[in-house]
């Protein structure tokens, strides 16, 4: 059992809505953190706008520990719209998303990033579903693109049950993929009304290399989104969450992701206090 440490805590760059590298450094410093997961889309979409971000963060002792690969055409209006448009599911965007993966992988290699998150999209629950094989091949292709640059792919959780994701990971291994792991986001499972995050983490813990620290309340209306809330104010049992990871000898990042609210730094600060207290308690 590996004691968990507050030194493992970091933050997603996109959660801080920074205007550029120096503004990002200021906000990460305000949180008292030294780890960042970097959204690689700005580097792709706005060439030059984020130049020097690694060096500027390093001036404050801040390390970029992972990246994020984003796909085009995603519509998060409702769970149903993202089911149709999320990740590498849409045929009409596959070629463009593959090219974007190549660009993102090259950026990650240049920055020395060895983990990049990706949303595969909704995986079919039945391996016999024709779309299961199609998505398996597409994700395998992404893994090969990133693997060629020395990068492992972290699959985001939320759109499917832990059992479905486990079956998918098994299929990936059968197909020869060795660089596909899991970025576990407990809130996503609640927001999508898909699974119990603690039970899901117990199943997936051996495959988890990073977690998103995010909290939520489950919807009371089927087919609608749940509500994202400040960490410690939702339905995630953080004590059980940290204990399961400790028992799995987890040494990856606890990366805060806040996608709602107008006071991101304040909200994340409050969440850091809550998580830090849990880590200290479970590591005592």
Image (cartoon, rainbow, N blue to C red):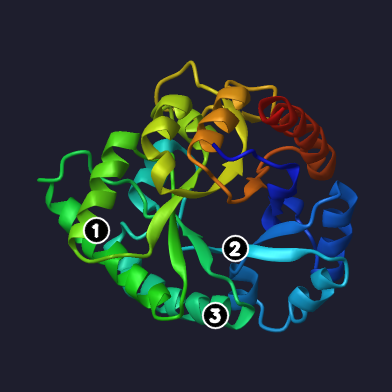
Q: Distance between the residues labelled 1 and 2?
A: 22 Å
Question: Is residue 282 found left or right of 237 in the rendered image?
Answer: right
Q: In this view, does 172 lie above or below 272?
A: below
Q: In this view, does 190 lie above or below 24?
A: above
N-term mark: 1 or 2 = 2
**Residue at x-position 53% and y-position 69%:** 114
Secondary structure found at label 3: helix
N-term mark: 3 or 2 = 2
Residue 9 at least partly seen: no
**Residue at x-position 68% and y-position 42%:** 258
Q: Distance between the residues labelled 3 and 2?
A: 11 Å
Secondary structure found at label 1: helix
**Residue at x-position 80% and y-position 32%:** 273
Q: Quadrant of the N terminus?
A: top right
Secondary structure found at label 2: strand
Residue that extends furthest to the top in the rendered view of this protein = 220
Q: How many marks?
A: 3
Q: Name the residue under label 2.
A: 66
Q: Residues within 10 Å of mark 1 (few under 14, many from 20)?
A: some
Q: Mark 3 points at which residue?
A: 109
N-term mark: 3 or 1 = 3
């Amino acid at each position: 059992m590996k004691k968990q440490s507050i030194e493992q805590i970091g933050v997603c760059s996109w959660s801080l809505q920074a205007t550029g590298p120096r503004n990002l450094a200021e906000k990460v410093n305000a949180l008292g953190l030294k780890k960042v997961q970097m959204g690689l889309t700005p580097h792709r979409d706005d060439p030059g706008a984020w130049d020097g971000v690694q060096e500027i963060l390093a001036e404050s002792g801040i390390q970029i520990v992972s990246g994020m690969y984003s796909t085009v055409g995603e519509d998060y209006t409702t769970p149903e719209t993202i089911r149709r448009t999320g990740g590498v599911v849409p045929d009409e965007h596959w070629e463009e998303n593959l090219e974007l993966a190549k660009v993102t992988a090259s950026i990650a290699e240049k920055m020395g990033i060895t983990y990049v998150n990706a949303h595969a999209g909704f995986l079919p629950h039945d391996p016999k579903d024709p779309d299961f094989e199609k998505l398996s091949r597409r994700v395998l292709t992404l893994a090969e693109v990133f693997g060629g640059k020395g990068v492992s792919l972290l699959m985001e959780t939320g759109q499917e049950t832990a059992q479905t994701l486990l079956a998918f990971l098994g299929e990936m291994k059968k197909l020869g993929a060795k660089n596909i792991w899991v970025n576990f986001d407990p809130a996503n499972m609640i927001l999508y009304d898909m699974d119990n995050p603690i039970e899901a983490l117990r199943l997936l813990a051996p495959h988890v290399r990073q977690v998103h620290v995010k909290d939520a309340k489950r919807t009371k209306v089927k087919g609608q989104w749940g509500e994202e809330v400040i960490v410690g104010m939702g339905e995630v049992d953080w004590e059980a969450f940290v204990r399961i990871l400790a028992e799995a000898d987890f040494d990856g990042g606890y990366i805060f992701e806040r996608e709602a609210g107008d006071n991101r730094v304040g909200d994340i600060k409050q969440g850091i206090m809550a998580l830090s207290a849990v880590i200290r308690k479970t590591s005592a």
